[in-house]
Image (cartoon, rainbow, N blue to C red):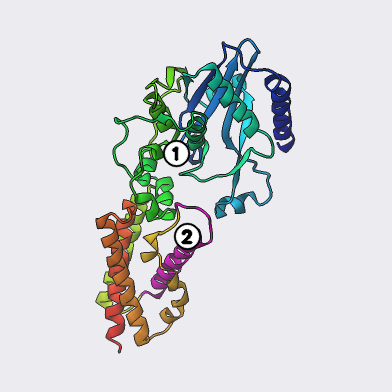
Amino acid sequence: MLKKYALLVLLAFFFLSTKAQQKNLSAKAEISVLTIGAGKNLNDAFGHSAFRIKDPVNRFDIIFDYGRFDFNAPNFYLNFVKGKLNYALGSNNFQDFLQYYIQVERSVKEQVLNLTQGEKQKLFNFLLNNYKPENRYYLYEFFFDNCATKIRDVIQENQNNTITFNAKEVYKNESFRALIHGNLIQNSWECFGIDLALGAVIDKQAKATEYMFLPKHVFTFLNGATTNASQKKLVKQSHTLNKAPEKQISANVITSPLVVLTIIGCFIIYLTYIDYKKNTRTRWLDISLFTITGLVGLIILLLWFATNHLGTKNNYNLLWAFTGNLFVIFQLLKTKSSLWFIGYLKLLIIMLCLLTMHWVTGVQCFNISLLPFLIALCLRYVFLVYYYQKQV
């Protein structure tokens, strides 16, 4: 696989060196933006964007896109988790590029840009220079520096920041989280995981041009874009190169987060009721809850403070997944509890109340599937306070 990847890169670079770099674009050359529809997996659920440079006179038709990365790079997975993964500008033959997306049944739309000959050459030269090994790499950031935002930024830079992106029918004052949800099945583990890992920073309202971190919004905003001076439309024509078959996507309701966490929540409440009636305590349940919430909290804490991901900052899921629970498990092994531990349990209840306030006031939107589990968790904490206070 590595040899194949290296060969493709070498061939692409050789092609650009011998074909593209030796000639200026002809008058019949066209530059367009390609928008790829969503795929079946989480890693391609948000689509893709690319530039297409087509010159029939000079006989080349190539693709430039900013979505390349190397699985075989040193510390790939560690850098991905830490938010230090380098993406790169890549190039490919258009027909090969198109054929791949036809095979995987993803839509491909093209927008031909309305550029002068000088503007085409300037943009082409920029991409050629950016494709050089010393220039092609950049630090990927999902919301602000990805394959879609690069399209927006490259066009704007090469037009001397004179482009106005208009898409009033799309811009609805939504948050980054709401925009992500628009590409996912709401009651799915993918959506649950994203809501768990990403913090309050993505609950702020996205600006109009910030919508363009998603390829589908790049397409929409480009359609309405104009130059400030002449009010000339940026896109002169749009057409579909491949229409993907309609997919009937549905989550398995039985194994969905809402159903699974509701069952778990009901089980916790049931055991708590039994414990209350028998004046006893199910020790394994409490140890399990404190271990799970503590470990989840530790992961959230590391994503917040030990990575460069912007979206994982200010994550108030820590109000229920509290890392401190890992350090007080020994108290649950005792028959009688210390007074300070009762105070600690009251603190956990207060934090759940704070979480509710954050949710209601819109500071952070939590996944709705968490609700039955959080209710059960709160009732369990209340019971533990009651149980331990009777022993004091």
Question: Magenta part mainly helix, strand or loop?
Answer: helix
| Residues in magenta, as a range | 282-311
Amino acid beneath label 1: Phe
* Nearer to us: label 1 or label 2: 1
Residue 153 tag number: none
Residue 320 in view (yes/no)? no
Residue 304 tag number: 2
Above or below, comparing residue 330 to residue 371 in the picture: below
Dividing the picture into quadrants, the one containing residue 173 is top left
- The residue that appears at 27% across and 61% down in the rendered structure is 356
Percent across and percent down for residue 47 are: 47, 33
State left or right for residue 99 relative to residue 315.
right
Query: Camera-side residue: 237 or 109?
Result: 237
Quadrant of the snapshot with the C terminus = bottom left
Amino acid beneath label 2: Trp
State left or right for residue 49 relative to residue 203.
right
Dividing the picture into quadrants, the one containing residue 12 is top right
The stretch drawn in magenta includes residue 273:
no
Dividing the picture into quadrants, the one containing residue 290 is bottom left
Percent across and percent down for residue 80 are: 57, 50
- The residue that appears at 50% across and 62% down in the rendered structure is 305
The stretch drawn in magenta includes residue 305:
yes
Q: Is mark 2 on a helix, strand or loop?
A: helix
Q: Mark 1 points at which residue?
A: 213
Query: Camera-side residue: 146 or 126?
Result: 126
Percent across and percent down for residue 213 are: 44, 38
Q: Which of marks 1 and 2 is nearer the N terminus?
A: 1
Percent across and percent down for residue 254 are: 36, 46
Above or below, comparing residue 144 to residue 365 in the picture: above
